[in-house]
Image (tube, helix red, strand yellow):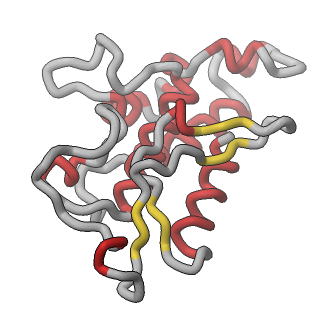
């Protein structure tokens, strides 16, 4: 699913006529096709990023309110920044650890400035198996002791994918 989402965002951001920023990337806006392929859906907050479009279609900075969903919205949007590819990357970076840890960004354990990004970052790489959603591992056809103790390829893959999530969900868009 993560690969499907990244491919969809790559297409929307870089290969459509005008770059499209979905703007509200979250689990309920990821749809599964009949073959379990993930698709980005709900373009209600989408923006086109092109100087060739009429002014009415271009993304505008607004102080009327933050557009998006709490927990997935890029921090810079709270300061009035307009929709951007970096904002979608941030949301994608929140979705990755959510998928692999089973923790939502609005989980009750995240208080006093603690968040899903920090939760994931502090566990990498040594404690990745402690934060992993173990129900994902139970779906594997052959679970052995190397997987459950955190040794082997599964741990290596989790570290890699969660590192991508952490990299994508940095607070500063330039990071």
Q: Quadrant of residue 86?
A: bottom left
Q: Quadrant of the N terminus?
A: top right
Horizontal arrangement in the rendering, residue 17 relative to residue 116 (left or right): right
Asked where in the image residue 21 lies, by quadrant, the reply is: bottom left
The single residue placed furthest to the bottom in the displayed view is 52
Looking at the rendering, which quadrant does residue 132 occupy? top right
The reply, left or right, for residue 114 in relation to residue 48 is left
| Residue 92 at x, y percent in the picture | 47, 46
Q: Is residue 13 above or below residue 77?
A: below
Q: Is residue 160 among the parts visible in the rendering?
A: no
Q: Position of residue 4 (x, y in %)?
A: 69, 49
Given residues 88 and 101, the one toward you in this image is 88
Residue 170 or residue 58, whichever sits in front: 58
Q: Please tell me whether residue 175 is drawn above or below residue 167 in the rendered image.
A: below
Count of number-bearing discs: 0
Q: What residue lies at 36% left-to-right and 86% top-to-bottom? A: 51
> Eyeballing the image, is 131 above or below 77?
above
**Dividing the image into 4 quarters, which one contains the C terminus?**
bottom left
Residue drawn at x 20%, y 18% is 111
Q: Position of residue 20 (x, y in %)?
A: 49, 66
Q: In the rendered view, does 40 fall on the left or right side of 54?
A: right
């Amino acid at each position: 699913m993560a690969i499907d989402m990244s491919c969809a965002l790559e297409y929307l951001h870089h290969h459509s006529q005008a770059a499209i920023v979905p703007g509200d990337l979250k689990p309920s806006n990821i749809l599964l096709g009949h073959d379990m392929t993930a698709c980005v859906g709900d373009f209600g907050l989408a923006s086109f990023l092109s100087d060739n479009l009429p002014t009415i279609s271009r993304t505008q900075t607004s102080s009327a309110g933050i557009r998006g969903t709490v927990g997935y919205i890029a921090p810079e949007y709270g300061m009035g920044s307009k929709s951007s590819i970096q904002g979608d990357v941030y949301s994608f970076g929140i979705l990755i650890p959510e998928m692999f840890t089973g923790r939502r960004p609005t989980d009750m354990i995240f208080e006093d400035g603690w968040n899903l990004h920090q939760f994931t970052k502090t566990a990498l790489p040594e404690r990745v198996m402690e934060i992993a959603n173990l129900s994902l591992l139970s779906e594997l056809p052959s679970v052995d002791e190397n997987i459950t103790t955190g040794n082997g390829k599964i741990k290596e893959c989790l570290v890699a994918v969660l590192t991508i999530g952490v990299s994508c969900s940095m607070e500063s868009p330039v990071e």
